[in-house]
Image: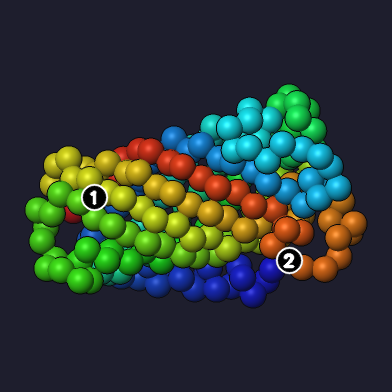
Amino acid sequence: MRRLLLIIGILMSASVAAQDKCWFVSANVAGSLFYGNEEIDRDIDKSPFKSFRNNLGISLAVGHWFSPEIALRTKLNGFWGRFVVTEDAATNANHYFTLNEQVLLDVTNIFGDADPGRKYHLIPFFGAGFGRNMTYNRWSTNLSVGLLNQFRLTDRLMLNAELGFTLHTREFSGGDERKYPYHSLENEDRQFQLELGVTYHLK
């Protein structure tokens, strides 16, 4: 945990130290879909369309483009989630937040000309961070990957459509992580995200 926080701190410091002014801020409405290790021994419907499994939240980010191809952003996500132990949405409800440091790669600029008037940008991202389940007072670490689609509205304003996946350590959902002591994808907590919003470039 300490090493992860140190890495995040170094990346954030590098971002702040950059002197060109290609900064941006983002705000999205975030729909999240939750799967937890507590479901292993329970006969719970796996459908992503069940209300007991998904919830709406928000995400906020600030970042910096170091070049037309690569950026770094710090992203806060939350705040209404699900801890899936039953098929009842109210029982599963909890509050959480995650904070991630992510690298963004604009593949449309990597494989094409860096055109400032480009209408569409395809931007894969990956990163790491930590989360807190505020309902159950649990901390966790995580890894995140995803795909950001951006559509140019004006010179400074972009429309976001983002798909993401976050793999949390099993403490995230607030359940008994000691029940499954070995690490595997099924034994950790998983979160899928669909986000819609805007990005504003501060230049």
Residue at the limit of the structure toward the right, as seen here: 179
Locate residue 118, reporting x and y percent: 13, 54
**As rendered, which of 191 and 26 lies closer to the eye?**
191
Decide: is 73 above or below 43. Answer: below
Locate residue 189, reporting x and y percent: 70, 53
* Mark carried by residue 184: 2
Tell me the amino acid under the disc marked 2: Ser
Q: Which picture quadrant has residue 5?
A: bottom right
**187 left or right of 73 in image:** right
- Dot in front, 2 or 1: 2
Locate residue 170, reporting x and y percent: 75, 56
Residue at 73%, 66% in the rendered image: 184
Tell me the amino acid under the disc marked 1: His
Image quadrant occupied by the N terminus: bottom right
Residue at 48%, 52% in the rendered image: 164
Tell me the residue that label 1 is attached to: 201
Decide: is 14 above or below 178. Answer: below
Give the Cα distance between marks 2 and 1.
39 Å
SS for tag 2? loop
Around disc 2, counting alpha carbons within 10 Å, would you say few (fewer than 14), some (14 to 19), or many (20 or more)?
A: few
Q: Which picture quadrant has residue 84?
A: top right
Locate residue 9, reporting x and y percent: 52, 68
Residue 156 showing in the rendered view: no
**151 left or right of 40 in image:** left
**As rendered, which of 160 and 61 lies closer to the eye?**
160
**179 left or right of 144 in image:** right
Residue 158 showing in the rendered view: yes
Q: Which picture quadrant has residue 137?
A: top right
